[in-house]
Amino acid sequence: MKKVKVGVVGVYRGKSMIDYCAQDERVKLTAICDIWKDGLNKVKAELNDDSIAFYDSFDEFLKTADMDAVVLANYATEHAPLAIRCLKAGKHVYSEVLPVQTMAQAVELAETVEKSGKVYAYAENYCYMAAPREMKRLYLNGDLGEFEYGEGEYFHNCEPGWADLTYGDENHWRNRMYANFYCTHSVGPLLHITGLRPVKVSGFELVHNKRMARMGAKGGLAGVEMVTLENGAVIKSVHGVGISKNSVWYSVYGSLGTAESGREAAEGSGHVSRIYTNLDRYDGECVDRLVAYNPVDSLSGRAMANGHGGSDFYCMYNFISKLLGEKDADIIDVYEALDMFFCGLLGYRSVLDGGAPAEIPDFKNPNVREKYRHDTACTDPDVAGDKLIPSYSKGNPDIPASVYKNMKEKCRIR
Ligand SMILES: NC(=O)c1ccc[n+]([C@@H]2O[C@H](COP(=O)([O-])OP(=O)(O)OC[C@H]3O[C@@H](n4cnc5c(N)ncnc54)[C@H](O)[C@@H]3O)[C@@H](O)[C@H]2O)c1
């Protein structure tokens, strides 16, 4: 069998995809790249495999590595420039979250994917968790009826791990991100379940609290997006790293009833992997038919050992299947990826605009994109130019240098 040759960029989060390659006989991991030499050497020693080439320069990696596809697990704000270079070099791309940093990058990414004819898959793994996966199956089967309302939550109190995640670098993307930035774990699954396009977003920003100040993060503790879909349905998406307790939770309200995942705190019952449904057999039946189960499919057994409730497995599995010609392999393409991210990017614009709703453009239409070609607004001064926006809508908080010094000292991995 012809194997798909894969190269991975970024060895921290990227380790999950590196480990995946060893589990899929359809894949050969040929190259690994990271500018962090100690991290690269550690992975090299651990894998102890002479058939894999190791690079500390992306330029060299792209120029000389023998690969069909590149997995991008580099900084969340720098995926688009590398994805564009990979696509232009004839490689398929699997991009970690988020797909782009600016609207201008979104234009360039969409155009490059179209011109390249290569596969671009967005690694929004939360779409493939057991409960949202089952919700999608129920929705496509017609069991939920028409989608009317849904909620997605991704709260992760990252304070305990912040030192390792940001290594005391004030300018690490996690310290500079605005509250609505990291939105696709919450809104993504709802969009993927329904396949509906978001058309309008109103954004909200929670305050910059003491936890964010202790972490050295400059944005609000969480973001909220109220998203209107093309059929008039509404999604509430909430997410943040500065909240006190964690929650991964999804709910769908269809014309035939509801489906929701278990709450994080409901340990012992399958919690986030469990689904609770209450479905009518026909519109207007209106009886309670409560069912709870832990959904499984033919890949669940293999997926279990992988990260994020096995969702990391499905995401890569579908990407490889797509490359091997499986037309219906369940990947998230560039347009869907951008739809997911625009909810946060434009949600924050709505915050900056006093809560006025922002239209979400349909990037499948090239004419619609034109307006955004030079829209570089973001929180990274090197990319934004004269369109720099603050990480916090009320102005960036003053964080003393001692906070970053403390984080640097606490970091155990770099
Ligand atoms: N989907 C998920 O569940 C999930 C979980 C964690 C992280 N992530 C995503 O994974 C990505 C990486 O996150 P992380 O936690 O590893 O932290 P990170 O963003 O700090 O690390 C990125 C890694 O890429 C390397 N890197 C950066 N630029 C590079 C370049 N030009 N060439 C080669 N290597 C480069 C860095 O040295 C580092 O090791 C982010 O996009 C993050 O959003 C996703």
Image: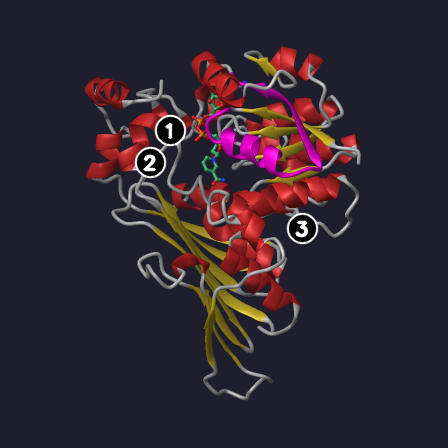
The image quadrant of residue 91 is: top right
- Give the residue type that dot 1 points to: Arg
Q: Where's the N terminus, which quadrant?
A: top right
Specify few, some or many for label 2: CA neighbours under 10 Å numbering under 14, 14-19, or 20 or more: many
- Residue of label 2: 219
Label 2 residue SS: loop
Badge 3 marks a residue whose secondary structure is: loop
The disc, 3 or 2, on the residue closer to the chain's N-terminal end is: 2
Q: Separation of disc 3 and disc 1 at Cα?
A: 32 Å
Name the residue type under label 2: Gly
Q: Which residue lies under the disc numbered 3? A: 330
Kindly report which numbered mark, 3 or 2, lies closer to the viewer in this rendering: 3
Q: Which residue is mark 1?
A: 176
Question: Badge 1 local density, few (<14 within 10 Å), some, or many (20+)?
Answer: many
Task: Identify the residue shown where x is 71% and y is 45%.
Answer: 364
Query: Which range is magenta?
Result: 11-34
Which of 196 and 398 lies nearest the eye of the viewer? 196
Amino acid at the residue labelled 3: Asp
